Amino acid sequence: MEKQATREAIAFIGLGIMGKPMAGNLLKAGYTLYIYDILPQAVEAVEKMGGIPCASPKEAASKAERVLTMLPNSPEVKEVLLGENGVLQGMRPGSIVVDMSSIDPNVSVELGKKVAEAGGFLVDAPVSGGEPKAIDGTLSFMCGGEPEVFEKVRPILETMGASVTLVGEVGSGNMTKLANQIVVALNIAAVSEALVLAAKSGVDPEKVYKAIRGGLAGSTVMDAKAPMMMERRFDPGFRIDLHVKDLNNAVQAGKAAEMDLPLTHMALDMMKRLQAEGKGKLDHSALVQYYEEREQVEIKGGKTP
Ligand code: NAD
């Protein structure tokens, strides 16, 4: 049966691990999608779901007044928006660009100004939740933008997410994402440090985990990552490479705010060391290996209930 396009057209640029299922959910909901990615196989996968391929971000942006981007980092978003054959070359007046990538908040502010100069509006709307929630359409969006602009794209974001929050002006979405990434990284580092100390001291780390998870030390991060560490499941999840990218952006944001971030620097150094050992593609729970290598101890446990 032919699918009816009942909703507005959207340009969707960046069809990777996250972008592909997010685009899929918009197509299922009846949006018409004009798609672009530098990788032909990424375009083909979404074309099979009903997306309409375009030759450039410029062409995609010329077809729709809503432009979504889901790209790796600040340089790619700058390239796609400002580059030759970029979004701003083809964007219709009054268009809303929603950048869902996790990037440096100060770059979001800079891009917001450029999009406004070109007659459009920008909302920065990074997500948390990872691929499983991108597939389920239950991501959490943290948004920065003008309230009336945000309201116009809220239904689109709600199609892909269970929680959509406007935090403040352009850049606030990515600042919120950085806050999230700092808390997650430091929590993983703390869990690693504590469980390796227990193991090195001859105390069963799994029993330590079970004993403390219901108290004040317990956390969503601990419940997600401690079992992975003990069961030696380091397939991602969220890659160390991506977390290094986010913490580097946090350091940049710290510099812009003239604030030192001592704990963030420590977690970043640990993750960079694992990256240098070729472990960047592992889940960030592999941070425990930083301690294990130093202490010559491995934490292990059975399946946790
Ligand atoms: P990805 O690398 O799988 O996908 C990015 C896509 O962008 C790729 O298909 C790539 O070909 C495309 N791309 C790169 N440069 C391009 C350009 N110049 N023009 C057009 N396309 C280009 O990354 P991902 O995992 O989908 O992550 C996207 C963003 O979401 C990142 O900022 C990431 O930090 C964030 N994020 C990821 C996760 C996760 O679990 N993977 C979770 C939350 C947030």
Image: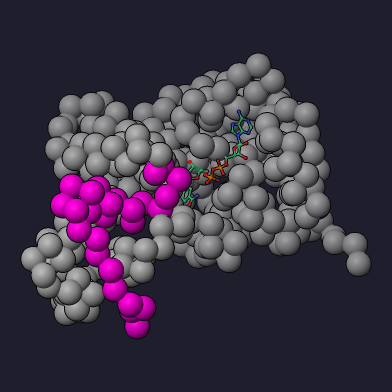
User: Does residue 27 appear to the left or right of 17 in the view shown?
Assistant: right
- The magenta-colored residue range is 279-305
Q: Residue at x 46, y 55 (%)?
A: 236
- Residue 55 position in % (x across, y down): 78, 29
- The magenta stretch spans residue 262: no
Q: Residue furthest right?
A: 1
Residue 140: name its quadrant. bottom left
Residue 170 vs 188, above or below: the answer is: above
- The magenta stretch spans residue 294: yes
- Residue 216 position in % (x across, y down): 14, 72
The residue nearer to you, when weighing 89 against 16, is 16
Q: Residue at x 58, y 66 (%)?
A: 136
- Give the quadrant of ligand 1: top right
Residue 150 vs 112, above or below: the answer is: below
The residue nearer to you, when weighing 230 against 109, is 230
- Residue 39 position in % (x across, y down): 69, 35
Residue 303 vs 176, above or below: the answer is: below
- Residue 68 position in % (x across, y down): 61, 41
| Quadrant assignment for the C terminus | bottom left
User: Does residue 261 appear to the left or right of 162 in the view shown?
Assistant: left
Q: Residue furthest left?
A: 201
| Quadrant assignment for the N terminus | bottom right
Q: Residue at x 19, y 71 (%)?
A: 205
User: Does residue 132 appear to the left or right of 186 in the view shown?
Assistant: right
User: Does residue 102 appear to the left or right of 55 in the view shown?
Assistant: left
